[in-house]
Amino acid sequence: MFKKVMIAGLCTAVLLTVVRVHSDLSELVTEVTPMGIVSFELAESRAAAEEMMAVIGKSPLKVNIILDFFLLIAYSCFFFFCCQAFISFFTKTWQRWMGYLFLELSVLAGLLDFIENVAMLITLSENITKTSVWVSRHAAIAKFGIIALVVVYIIMMILVSYFYNKRRKGHG
């Protein structure tokens, strides 16, 4: 299990770096898009999305979205494998239930990111609609919220696991 977590974590880190470098090289951060691609993900209206596309250009946005498809697979697997490891580590029913809950939330975050990316690709096409911008925005908001919860859970479980092992070794 540790090997799966490490490989997925490494892939996530590499892809985050690639996306970040692409964002810098493509100059996705502008006055109109202060958060880069995230500004486009969270566009509040069709007019705002069109303005961002006019400033940045469709091609850099499209490349970033395509890279994000790979990133969402990597981070979803990383979160999934972390939660799976916690499920196998803990023995109490409620701890395992929490592991399963966050495992499912990890999959949901990836699914929402997929929906968001498809909506953004529709927005970039000639078929831009208020609906595609709305779907992208709300899927992104939900995704970011879920990712924040999963990251907090993983950090907490790492700390709990560390102190549990430390306590066990101290009494052994």
Image (tube, helix red, strand yellow):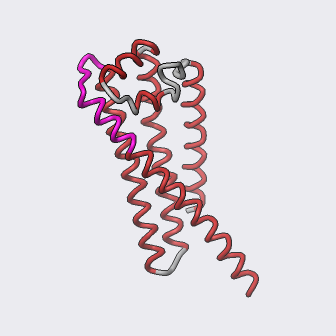
Q: Which range is magenta?
A: 125-141
Q: Is 129 within the magenta?
A: yes
Residue lying at 36% horizontally and 40% vertically, measured from the top left: 114
On screen, residue 130 versus residue 87, left or right, reads left
Figure quadrant of residue 138: top left
Using the image, determine if residue 68 lies above or below residue 164.
above
Instruction: Tell me the chief SS of the magenta region.
Output: helix
Q: Position of residue 63 (x, y in %)?
A: 45, 23
Q: Nearer the viewer, residue 43 or 57?
A: 43
Residue lying at 58% horizontally and 49% vertically, measured from the top left: 9
- Of the 4 image quadrants, the one containing the N terminus is bottom right
- Of the 4 image quadrants, the one containing the C terminus is bottom right
Q: Position of residue 169 (x, y in %)?
A: 73, 81
On screen, residue 166 versus residue 21, left or right, reads right
Q: Position of residue 14 (x, y in %)?
A: 60, 38
> Looking at this rendering, what residue extends furthest in the bottom direction?
172
On screen, residue 141 versus residue 75, left or right, reads left
